Image (spheres, grey):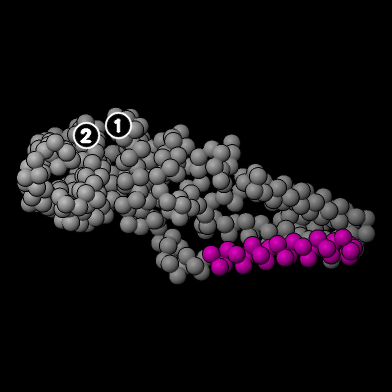
Amino acid sequence: APALVSIVSFNLCFARGAVFGGMDLLATGVCTDALSLYFFLALVIFLSLAWATLPYINFFGRDKYGMGYWIECFAADTLAAAAAVYYSVYGTYTGEVLMVMLLVVASVFNFACMMWFLSQLVRGRTVFCPEIKWGPLSFMKLTHEAVRGALPTFTKALTEMRLEDEGSVQLFCAHFSQFVMLHEEHSRHEDEVIFKAFNDLFPEQGKKWNDDHEHDRVLIVHWKGLVNTILSTQAPPQARAAAIQELQTTLPQFLEHFAEHLKGEEDHLQPVGKRYLPLELQKQISRKVWEITPAARWEVLVPYLVNNLPRNLQRVRYLKALLWAMPERAQQIGAIVYRNVDSVKWEMLRTEIPEMIPRGTYNWRRYY
């Protein structure tokens, strides 16, 4: 703003002197004094903001590119223009150096923003179209997407399980344990918190899916017994083989039913949350969901979901949905992700969500 004021005030003063007093106003320094004052004030502000972008401070420049970055380009252009006017008036070597430096800085800013703009335009993201609508409850649908991403691997482990191959047995049991934990906690979240809120608005809206949960829990208890039989070294080989055979026969049908169950929830229940629940109520629901599940289970569930979401954008949105409702848990959630994903995936996530980087780890910055 001071750079713009310096240019405008000088031009107005120059025009006034030319019309009413010849060059008297310029000769007395009335116009040049205001030009110098506002220009150097703008230069001090610019240097202060530049200092705030240094890596050890990282107050500015930490957000990913958006159209708002063109505001910085406009500010840099205005300061460079003010430097050019200052040099044209005074003609000093210092003024020339300042003008060249600020023109270079403004050119770099504009070039970088133009390249980012073109890359975003090619990718079709957030340039001439709005952001995809999402909110704190979006983590529920993304949970469904993660389950769909995990089902092929789970089904393959089930199909390839052989009693004589202990590795295949252990692999299936690991998948089964994670899936059962997810089903237990996810169905609990829906029955006790989310669907309860939906039913408050539309009585018995979620009854069918609540009943499905109850029925599925009975089946899972039975399958847990079969898995325990398979893992038991005391059980006869015939009983273990029969348990594997039963799982390979009945579990695929259940997984098909479960996929249809998720689709039904998305078609008939999630629109209720999206259209009828205000933002504050969605945040309260997300908080309750987090609180009713022990931290030890989140240590398994969050990585399971993040690792099984097929696209990085979905992983980022899942984590951002949690942090939207619980920004104070950014460090806890970030630490869970940091401990349980590979380094490449972590780099992709922490670049998009720098606020979740655990304290003391690489690239952690103080945000206050």
Q: Which residues are magenta?
A: 89-116
**Which residue in the structure is indicated by mark 1?**
293
The amino acid on which the numbered mark 2 sits, given as a three-letter code, is Arg
Q: In terms of secondary structure, where does tag 1 sit? A: loop
Residue 210 visible in this rendered orientation of the protein: no
- Give the quadrant of residue 198: top left
Going by the numbered disc 1, the residue's amino acid type is Thr
Picture residue at 32% right of the left edge, 47% below the top: 305
In the image, residue 288 lies at what x, y percent? 31, 31
Q: Position of residue 153 (x, y in %)?
A: 24, 55
> Can you tell which mark lies on residue 106?
none
Compared across the picture, whether 156 is left or right of 5 comes to left
Residue that label 2 marks = 188
Q: Magenta-highlighted stretch: main secondary structure?
A: helix
Q: Is residue 360 above or below residue 42?
A: above
Q: Residue at x 56, y 46 (%)?
A: 362
- The reply to whether the C-beta atoms of the residues labelled 2 and 1 are less than 8 Å apart is yes
Q: Is residue 177 visible?
A: yes
Residue 55 included in the magenta stretch of the image: no
72 versus 115 height, above or below: above
**What is the x, y in percent for residue 280?**
36, 35
Classify 154 as above or below 77.
above
